[in-house]
Image (tube, helix red, strand yellow):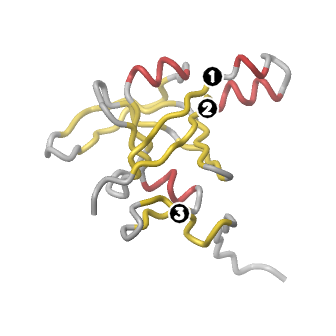
């Protein structure tokens, strides 16, 4: 299977909340639309410093990332990012890998939007068609 690219919009979730609360104007919400690689081998949304700066995302934590070339890097994670793909959206942290050339849309944001990578058509599609379906195994319902 080759690399599968898809267009996403990333939005600073704090800005979005501040705009909803009337603390900033909606045109002050920082966002960027870009092409990402749908990477089921990656867990997180992966961005570089330039995109983090454009979105104005604060750092929240630090994690060790094992990258494809076998190297382990200590990388920072960000506050919440809204990830939008067509009619779907989810919230997640981003892993900031300095100098990363590509944005990776990993398993957490893919699952959060009920998306799969179709190896035959080489595209990202809804796991259950065009309607978003969220599964929650909750048994204590009367």
The x and y percentages for residue 50 are: 41, 20
Disc on the earlier residue, 3 or 1: 1
Using residue 26 as the reference point, say whether residue 65 is left or right of it: left
126 up-or-down from 16: above or below? below
Secondary structure of the residue carrying tag 3 is strand
Measure how far apart labels 3 and 2 are at the Cα level: 21 Å
- Indicate which disc, 2 or 1, sits on the residue closer to the N terminus: 2
- The x, y position of residue 84, in whole percent, is 61, 44
Task: Say which residue appears at 34% left-offset and 37% top-offset.
Answer: 63
Residue 17 picture location, percent across and down: 75, 30
Q: How many marks do you count on the picture?
A: 3
Task: Indicate which disc residue 88 carries.
Answer: none
Badge 3: residue crowd in 10 Å (few <14, some 14–19, many ≥20)? some
Rendered image: mark on residue 11: 2
Q: Tell whether label 1 touches label 3 (CB within 8 Å).
A: no
Q: Residue at the location (63% across, 50% down)? A: 86
Residue matched to label 3? 125
Task: Check contact, mark 2 vs mark 1: CB within 8 A.
Answer: yes
Cα distance in 3D space between marks 3 and 1: 26 Å
Residue nearest the observer in this picture, 137 or 96:
96
Q: For residue 48, what is the image quadrant?
A: top left
Label 2, label 1: how far apart the Cα atoms are? 6 Å
Is 17 or 130 nearer to us in this picture? 130
Query: Along the polypeptide, which appears first: circle 3 or circle 2?
Result: 2
Residue at label 1? Answer: 30
Query: Residue 26: percent from the left, percent from the top?
Result: 77, 22
């Amino acid at each position: 299977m080759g690399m599968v690219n898809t267009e996403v919009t990333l939005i600073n979730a704090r800005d979005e909340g501040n705009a909803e609360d009337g603390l900033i104007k909606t045109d002050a919400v920082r966002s960027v639309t870009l092409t990402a690689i749908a990477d089921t081998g990656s867990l997180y949304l992966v961005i570089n410093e330039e995109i983090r700066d454009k979105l104005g995302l604060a750092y929240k934590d630090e994690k060790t990332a094992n990258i494809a070339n076998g190297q382990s890097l200590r990388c920072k994670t960000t506050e919440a990012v809204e990830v939008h793909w067509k009619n779907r959206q989810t919230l997640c942290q981003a892993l900031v890998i300095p100098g990363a050339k590509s944005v990776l849309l990993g398993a957490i944001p893919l699952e959060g939007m009920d998306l799969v990578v179709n190896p035959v058509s080489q595209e990202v599609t809804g796991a259950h068609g065009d309607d978003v379906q969220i599964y929650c195994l909750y048994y204590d319902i009367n």
